[in-house]
Image: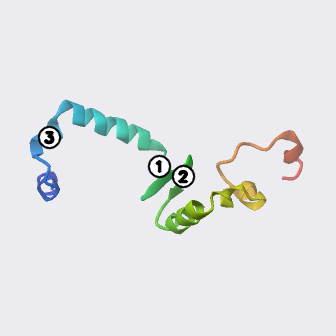
Amino acid sequence: MVTALAARLSVPIATLTMADIKQTLRKNTVSAAGVFGVPSLLINGELFWSVDGLDFAKAYLADPSILASGEMQRISPCRSPPQESEAARY
């Protein structure tokens, strides 16, 4: 399977065993540990994931302020914990 994929991508199979290539793959795998779904897009520090998130990512690219609305801040599961003054509302 790997051999067929390498051939299809015109990547010499020997390249896949090179130490620097393996190190880059390990580094990229570790950095992807926070990924929630596939595909995942990181745009200006905002993470969009899954096919369902593609339209939202497009909307964000058209208008980044979409995430700054009060409602988006309220429902964001990744936002910081509420401050004491906010906690009374929840």
For residue 11, above or below residue 71: above
Residue 35 got which mark? Answer: 1
Q: Position of residue 81 (x, y in %)?
A: 74, 43
Assess whether mark 3 and mark 2 are in contact (beta carbons under 8 angstroms): no
For residue 65, above or below residue 26: below
Res. 26 image quadrant: top left
Tell me which amino acid carries mark 3: Thr
Classify residue 65 as left or right of residue 87.
Answer: left
Residue 15 got which mark? Answer: 3
Query: Coloured how?
Result: rainbow
User: In the image shown, does 15 or 60 lie closer to the viewer?
Assistant: 60
Q: Position of residue 78 (x, y in %)?
A: 64, 48
Q: Position of residue 17 (x, y in %)?
A: 15, 37
Q: Position of residue 35 (x, y in %)?
A: 47, 49
Instruction: Using the numbered discs, state the Cα–Cα distance from disc 1 to disc 3 in whole angstroms.
Output: 27 Å
- Helix, strand or loop at disc 1? loop
Classify residue 50 as left or right of residue 12.
Answer: right
Residue at the spot 67% in from the left edge and 61% down from the top edge: 66
Classify residue 57 as left or right of residue 69.
Answer: left
Residue at the spot 11% in from the left edge and 52% down from the top edge: 3
Residue at the spot 29% in from the left edge and 39% down from the top edge: 25
Which sits earlier in the primary sequence, circle 1 or circle 3? 3
Tell me which amino acid carries mark 1: Val
Which sits earlier in the primary sequence, circle 2 or circle 1? 1
Tell me which amino acid carries mark 2: Leu
Which sits earlier in the primary sequence, circle 2 or circle 3? 3
- Helix, strand or loop at disc 3? helix
Instruction: Using the numbered discs, state the Cα–Cα distance from disc 2 to disc 1 in whole angstroms.
Output: 8 Å
Assess whether mark 1 and mark 2 are in contact (beta carbons under 8 angstroms): yes
Assess whether mark 3 and mark 1 are in contact (beta carbons under 8 angstroms): no
According to the picture, the residue beneath numbered tag 2 turns out to be 47
Residue 80 got which mark? Answer: none
